[in-house]
Amino acid sequence: MKILKANSKDLEKIYNRNFIDRKRIRECVSKILNDVRLFGDEALIRYTRKFDKVKLTVKQLRVSEREISGAYQNISPDFISTLKVVIENVNRFYKKQIKKSWKIRNSDGVVLGEQVSPIENVGIYIPAGTAPLFSSVYMSVLPAKLAGVKRIALVTPPNNLGFVDPHILVVADLLKVNEIYKVGGAQAIAALTFGTKTIPRVDKIVGPGNRYVTEAKKQVFGICDIDMLAGPTELLIIANRYSNFEFVKADLLAQGEHAEGLAILITNSKRLARQLKAEVQSGYIIITKNLEQAVEIANKVAPEHLEILTNNPRRLLKKIKNAGAVFLGPYSPVAVGDYVAGPSHVLPTGGSARFFSGLGLYDFLKSTHVIWYSKKALEKVKEPLEKIGSAEGLLKHIESVKVRFK
C-alpha cells in the first residue's frame, strides 16, 4: 500500500477519481449506445461476441424457461434455505421505507396531496465479470417488488459457454423474475434504454457495474432514469492504535478480490500503517494527526463502504456526512452488508455518495402532485397570483384565472 500524508497533493487524485480515463471511456460508450439504438439485436450480438467472446443467436439472448429450470440441478441443496433467511432480512429492512399517498385539506376548499405510485418498467443490471454477483439480484429485486414494480427485466453477461450462472437464475426465479437476458456492458444499458426487438425498453435502470456500465448509465440519464453511479467498489477504513490489526488486514485483503476495487486506510497510528504496508499490496494508507482529520478526509473521499474500527465508532459516526454505507465496530465487516444484513449493497461510488443514496425502495417509486382548488379558494389567491404573473410578463396566465369569474 502507498503511504500518503494528510496534506499530500496525491489526495486530489483520490477525491477526483471518477474522472480517470473519462474521455476514452465516454467515446467508447457513446459509440456502443448509438450502435444499439440504430441496429438493435444485431449490435447486441456483435458486442457480445467482441467483449464476452461468445457467439449467440438472437433467440439465445433471452434465457429460456428450460435454462431456468435446469439451473436448479447445478446448485447445492441448502442454497435455497440459506437464501430464504437472507430474503427475510432484506424485506424487513425495506418494509420500513414503504411510502403512501397523502393529502391535506384546509377550510377554503383547497386539497393538496402527493400520489405515490411504482415505476412500471425497471431494468436491473447484474455484474458477472470476475464473479457472478447473484447477491445483487436479491439486493435489487426485493425493494423493487416491495415498491410494486410490475415488470422487471434482468440483464447480465453470459459466461464463455454462453450461459448465465445458475445461482443468478435460481435467485431470479425464486423472486418471480423470468425476463432475463444474456447481455452485459454498455450494450445492455443501451438495450434497456432504447429497446430492441428482443428486449423492450424500460423506464429506469438500476444496479452496479464497471466503469463502462456506469458511464453508459450516465449518458442515458434523461432518456430513462437511473438509480445512481454505482461503479467499481470502494472501501475506506478509519482505524487507530486500538484497532485489531488482523481485522483491518482481512478487510483490506477482501477488498483486493475486486479487480477494479479501491482500498484506503486512514489512521493516526504510524505503527499500524507500517504493519499494513508490509502485509497488503494495493491501495492507500493516509496518515493523519488525529481522528477528526481522518473524518474530514473521509467525508471528502465519500466512499461506497466506510468501516469505523476505532474503539468508539459511534462518536465518529455523528460526524460522517458522505458515505454509501457505514459499518461500525470490529464485528461489522463489509462482507456482512454484501450478503446478509438487509440494506442493499448497491451503493454510490466515485465520490457520488456526496449526493446519491444507497438503493432503496424509494428508487422504484414516483410521486405526482395533486392540486384541487374550489372557486372560493381560487378567488382568495387571485390578487397575489396577478401580481406575480404581471411581474413575469405572463398575462395570459392571469387571464386563465380571471375568466373563471366572468
Image (tube, grey):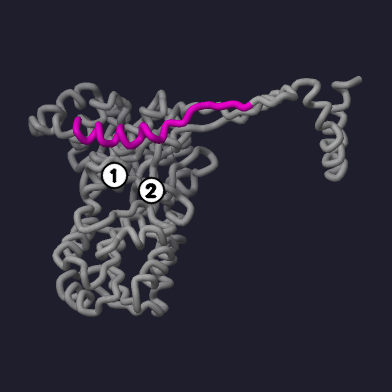
- Which callout, 2 or 1, points at the residue further toward the start of the chain? 1
Residue 232 inside the magenta-drawn segment: no
What residue does disc 1 label? 127
* Residue depicted at x 36% and y 42%: 207
Residue 157 percent location from the top left of the image: 28, 41
Residue 46 percent location from the top left of the image: 34, 41
Q: Quadrant of the C terminus?
A: top right
Residue found at the far left of this picture? 77
Q: Main secondary structure of the magenta part?
A: helix
Tag 1: residue type? Pro
Q: Along the line of sight, which residue is nearer the eye, 157 or 327?
A: 327
- Left or right: 231 in relation to 241: right
Q: Quadrant of residue 142?
A: top left
* Residue depicted at x 41% and y 25%: 148
Tag 2: residue type? Val
At mark 1, the secondary structure is: loop
Residue 219, compared with residue 360, is above or below; it is below
Q: Quadrant of the N terminus?
A: bottom left
What residue does disc 2 label? 213
Q: Are marks 2 and 1 in contact (CB under 8 Å)?
A: yes
Residue 38 percent location from the top left of the image: 48, 38
- Distance in Å between CA atoms under marks 2 and 1: 9 Å
- Left or right: 131 in relation to 216: left
Segment colored magenta: 84-104
